[in-house]
Amino acid sequence: MTIEESLQKNGVHLATPIGKSMLPLLKSRRNNVVIKPITQKLKVNDVVLCKRDNGAYILHRIIKIKGDRYFLRGDNQFVLDKSIVKNNILGVMVGFYKKDKFISVNSFLYKLYVFFWRIIFPIRFPFMVIKYLFSRNK
């Protein structure tokens, strides 16, 4: 069953993210995210599951909305993905499991993480660029 079918049939999709783009919030192959279909207007800081035009799935945070364009970025990235339109967005993360504990996106600790992580982006950015440049030289 595809992700799209799971969302349509069950109203929810449980997935295990692979990759480092959402670190430190989500660790590759360790956390499970709960994705639900979009039922209300998407907003900045929502984490959305998208399907790119090339068929690749991504789970990233909305950084900016301009008209029908959504600007996304993983928490561990510094480049904005500007190619996303609403038709690409399959669902929104409502929470995730860290070990056996469910953490809702409505919880105080999650909101504190989002606030803090977004605020320190200007400080993190130079370090992320340096890290990226050094990793390319290997």
Image (cartoon, rainbow, N blue to C red):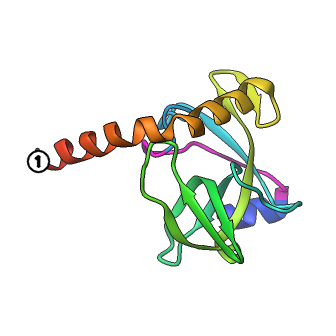
Label 1: which secondary element: loop
Query: Which residue sits at x=57%, y=53%?
Result: 60
- Residue 53: horizontal and vertical position, in percent? 52, 78
Residue 14 forms part of the magenta stretch: yes
Left or right side of 135 for 95: right
Q: Residue 91 location, x and y as percent? A: 73, 59
Relative image position of residue 24 (x, y in whole percent): 50, 31
Residue drawn at point x = 58 percent, y = 36 percent: 119
- Of 11 and 94, which appears nearest the observer? 94
The region drawn magenta spans: 10-21
Residue 1 shows in the view = no
Q: Is residue 8 above or below residue 122?
A: below
| Residue 112 belongs to magenta span | no
Q: Amino acid at mark 1?
A: Asn
Outermost left residue: 138
Q: Which residue corresponds to mark 1?
A: 137
Rendering quarter of residue 92: bottom right
* Tally of numbered tags: 1
Residue 55 in percent (x, y) is at 51, 73
Residue at 59%, 40% in the rendered image: 118
